[in-house]
Amino acid sequence: MAKKPSRRQRPPRAAAFAVALALMALSFALGWFFGVRSTQFHGKILLVNDSHRLASDYVPEGLVNLYQQRHSFRLAGSEITLTRETYEAMEQMFHAAEEADMNGYIVTSGYRSYQRQTEVYAQSEPGKAQQPGASEHQTGLAFDVTVETNDGFESTPQYAWLAQHAHEYGFIQRYPANKSDITGISYEPWHYRYVGVDAATRMWQSGQTLEEFLGEK
Ligand SMILES: [Zn+2]
């Protein structure tokens, strides 16, 4: 029969406490790591286009009003919302832009409901807007940005900065100039989509669209 350990054989209380703390810190770090990494798996990246439509009742979880958050960018309105993760990544990105003396970004659009997209579609010229359910804006993961310019956003230094750095914060330029045959959307230099740093970096390096990256084209 095993003898009950005497008091002296037990680890000192402080050491046990330190081990418990270390285990807690480790599990927290692992949870954080895999939580962050999990957004980067192929199956979890939401593809929305004409042939992959969202349901009319799809509303992303955790939308935040950008106007009510700290923002290192201007807003075209006080009602623009995005998912919290998208907002946090974009705030980091525009804060970094500001530190690089790149200012004047104006966010013009974020989440758009199915109902709102129905109105936008009805009011647009044919081919100028996505059909309801086919707009990435319904994901809450995409936003439009511009600056005050007479020349078009694509010819501004702010655009050039995003083209070089957006992937570092998890964003892709979703509708590049030479890829409209794949995306089905003509060049939109102002439209950015959150996919996580890993996927964005790989797409930036390979020049792939989201459709190509996910093996859909
Ligand atoms: Zn857009």
Image (cartoon, rainbow, N blue to C red):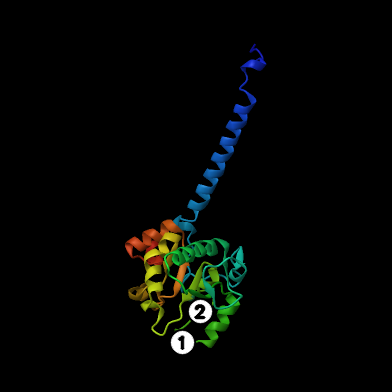
Question: Which badge, 2 or 1, comes first in the chain's sequence?
Answer: 1
* Residue topped by disc 2: 131
From this view, report whether residue 26 is shown above or below residue 40. above
Q: Residues within 10 Å of mark 2 (few under 14, many from 20)?
A: some
| Viewer can see residue 123 | yes
Kindly identify the residue that appears in the image at 35 percent across and 65 percent down: 208
Mark 1 lies within 8 Å of ligand 1 (Cβ measured): no
Amino acid carrying label 2: it is Gln
| Secondary element at image label 1 | loop
Kindly identify the residue that appears in the image at 50 percent across and 86 percent down: 124
Kindly identify the residue that appears in the image at 50 percent across and 52 percent down: 36
Quarter of the figure that contains the C terminus: bottom left
Between the C-alphas of marks 2 and 1, the distance is 10 Å
Residue 37 percent coordinates (x, y): 48, 51
Q: Nearer the viewer, residue 105 or 126?
A: 105
| Viewer can see residue 194 | no
* Residue topped by disc 1: 126
Amino acid carrying label 1: it is Pro
| Secondary element at image label 2 | loop
